[in-house]
Amino acid sequence: MRAEMMFKEYKNMKRELSVLEFQLRQFVGIDEEELIESMCFSHPEGDERIQTSSISDKTSKIALNYKHIAERENEDWYDFLLKRYKSIHEEITFFEHNILELQGVLSEVMMDLLNGELTWETMMKKYNVSHAMIGKYRKAAIKELNARYELRDKQTEAYILS
């Protein structure tokens, strides 16, 4: 992900990270009733007959497979949440670290822009510069951040190809 895209999606990613963190901490798995309902409406795989009584094949399959399916679904859901959390956390951490590493006033300006607490007019007064200069700071920071993203991509590529 490039710096410009991260800059635009930063708040959304922070929000998603917070939701994922909450879901992982409060994880209880899939509701039993939802699982049974989904199994009832699913189509049987193959033409296997479990027994030849008045109980339907679907009911027998649900009884035999419920625990296994519930565990698998819960593991898959938890793994998905954890993988997504790690991915977003890594991107945000990389982005924030590199913003803090920017030279001179760029780091402070970019953090103010990211946090969104200050308007451009307030920032003009804070840094005693023009509106255009704030834009130039942002452009310079994005350029430097993109160079760092390219370096990371090259390092990843070198590892994969080695």
Image: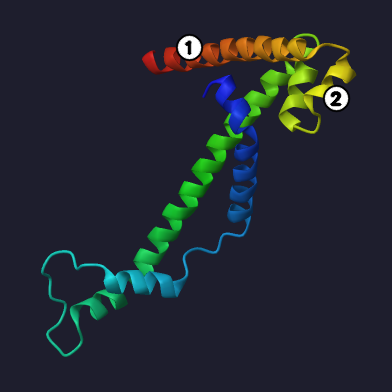
Q: Identify residue for label 2.
A: 122
| Residue 139 relative to residue 78: left or right | right
Give 80 or 96, whichever is nearer the viewer. 96
Q: Amino acid at mark 2?
A: Thr
Q: Residue at x 55, y 25 (%)?
A: 5
Furthest-bottom residue in view? 54
Rendering coords of residue 89 (x, y %): 60, 36
Rendering coords of residue 109 (x, y %): 78, 19
Q: Residue at x 64, y 24 (%)?
A: 95
Q: Identify residue for label 1.
A: 154
What is the distance, in whole Å, between disc 2 and disc 1 at their CAs? Answer: 38 Å
- Helix, strand or loop at mark 2: helix
Give 1 or 59, whichever is nearer the viewer. 1
Q: Quadrant of residue 132?
A: top right
Q: Amino acid at mark 1?
A: Lys
Rendering coords of residue 1 (x, y %): 51, 24
